[in-house]
Amino acid sequence: MKNIITILLFLLSCSMFGQMYNPVKWTTSVEKVSDKEYILKAEAAIQAGWHLYGQYIEEGGPSATAFNFKNPKKNFDLVGKTTEGKGHEVVDKIFNMKIKYFEEKALFTQKVKFNSDEITNIAAEVEFMVCDDSNCLPPSSEELSFKIPNGKKIAAAEENAVVNNNSVSEENVTVKEEVKAEKAVVASGKKNESRGLVSIFIIAFLSGFAALLTPCVFPMIPMTVSYFTKQSKTKAAGIRNALIYGFSIIIIYVLLGSIVTAVFGADSLNALSTNVWFNLIFFVLLVVFAISFLGAFEIMLPNALANKVDSQADRGGLIGIFFMALALAIVSFSCTGPIVGTLLVEAASKGGIAPIVGMLGFSTAIALPFSLFAAFPGWLNALPKSGGWLNTVKVVLGFLELALAFKFLSNADLVLQLHWLEREVFLTIWIAVFGTLAFYLFGKITLPHDSPLNHISVGRLGFGLVVLSFTIYLIPGLWGAPLKLISGFAPPMQYSESPYGVGFTKNSGNAAESLLPEGSEYGPQDIITFHDYDKGMEFAKKGGKPVLLDFTGYACVNCRKMEELVWSDPKVLNVLKNDVVLISLYVDDKKELLENEQYVSQTTGKKIKTIGNKWSDLQIKTYKANAQPFYVIVDHNSANLAEPSAYNPDIENYFNWLNSGIKNFKK
């Protein structure tokens, strides 16, 4: 009994972390059309959550399903092409292109015409590839056999005959556990994606409230509400019209988010965060938006468009109300445009439906006051009067956009590894930006559209103190302070002119400690880190330690958060420095491989040209995941010692996960 359990556990571990797992089962059947013509049917039963690709995939996509009917004696002819069912056509999340796929089951048929009566069986081979929402299995092939019924039409009951002779009972026993293992990392990724969308909505919602407090929008509230209350015959009609007006605002902005998603592709946007050109374009856009908010110029849509829309607003009814909402969006564009543009830039870099969620949050915050004040007009008396404070809000937003712009420039610099915008330079720029903002709030600096400031309000003074405190907080970062409040925004500590702070060098008093192993460097938190897989493995074997594979990216915000918030914990740091060998593989490393090292991926079919491509292909092929950060503890034979882990800010949980892998290594 003990031996049987051991064998089953071994098979389970192989299926969880090896290439034995196959979520597709093939069955065959044959249907008679005439004495000479038959239809060969191959049906794929696909496990829940997985999908099988169709036969016609453009170049650069996943491996298409392909059938090879063996006919050495030329006993039959293929009539037409192999046909397939309707399936689904979507933009694939991994391959970033429109692809046809099948879920649950897929039926492929091929009509054949016999030249001989001696045929009793037709052999075929099917090549195919399956993926789920976040990862793929390597391309597989199966041998199929079509039994010819000697002129008899096959009964429906016989269509379920399984011809896959490679299946074993042990695989059927462990299939549920296999699915659980394959989905663990995917579930974590989906949880983080959901959390990210909630964050986008909240940030956009708060940005919408900030936009309300700008000179272009705030004065429109009483004007618009007064219009509805005067034009409506009853209070109920006024409330109804105001609600329709609010919903129209939401529809207009959500439509804008939908257009951005449709133009770029819902699943290609998540590549923007590491794309150099997009980051540079975003940097320029945000700088232009910031300068506009600071008063240098105004970004406005053509007056002709505004006048045309405004004329449509006089039509009345639902159409007139909708054009009133559109008129508000156009007239207020000089104030809301930079905010909307910034939100779309940030949301687009998250990928998926983030732009739509962002515009939903923003427009909800804009629409809410108009609807509420229309329902309760008496509340208008509580609103502060328009004045110079509205321009102050606009200027503050300009400073914030200017600071955010340098995050995108930093991303481009990190990916290219140019070392132009290292940590000290980035922090110096932020200190200058927020320091200038503090002086502005204290009235020491005035800008073109500011009103005369006779005194500073309590609110402005309080906010100025908060900004000044944040500026002072940033200054010690120049001398090596971790600055956990901005983890993920500033470049990491090791991407610095002075990784140990200005005026300090690595010197622990022990000469042996200052000697780095060949192929390594000091990485995050001063951990000895390898970027070469083979050299790291060789060092681990010599030291008798397990390996922590760290699939990461130069522009990966969550990777920096893990390194600065979790890895910095004393007990976690002790493990990373002393008990494992860290190999960090950057999937966005743009350095090109040598010509003889480039190859075509067996998993994705794409050409692997750069070092980043190589590590990304390794992650997808071996661990069926493509998100970062992604951590795997392995032994010297690259066998997993614990279930892989994704982004996990829980320090205790991450520490226990590390220890579980180390304990398994020592067994």
Image (cartoon, rainbow, N blue to C red):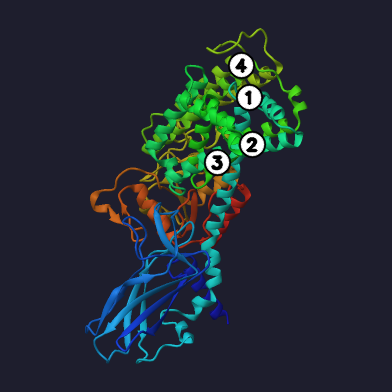
Query: Circle 2 sits in a helix, a strand or a loop, which is it?
Result: helix
Tell me which numbered mark, 1 or 2, is placed earlier along the sequence: 1
Report the side of 319 relative to 34 (left or right): right
Residue 441's tag is: 4
Can you see residue 328? yes
Kindly report which numbered mark, 3 or 4, lies closer to the viewer in this rendering.
3
Tell me which numbered mark, 4 or 2, is placed earlier along the sequence: 2
Q: CA distance from mark 1 to mark 2?
A: 13 Å
Tags 3 and 1 touching, CB below 8 Å: no
Work out whether residue 390 or residue 191 is closer to the camera in this orientation and state it.
Answer: 390
Identify residue type, mark 3. Answer: Val
Residue 246's tag is: 2
Kindly report which numbered mark, 4 or 2, lies closer to the viewer in this rendering.
2
Q: CA distance from mark 3 to mark 1?
A: 21 Å
Tell me which numbered mark, 4 or 1, is placed earlier along the sequence: 1
Residue 36 spot, x, y in % from top left: 29, 87
Work out whether residue 282 or residue 159 is closer to the camera in this orientation and state it.
Answer: 159
Residue 254's tag is: 3
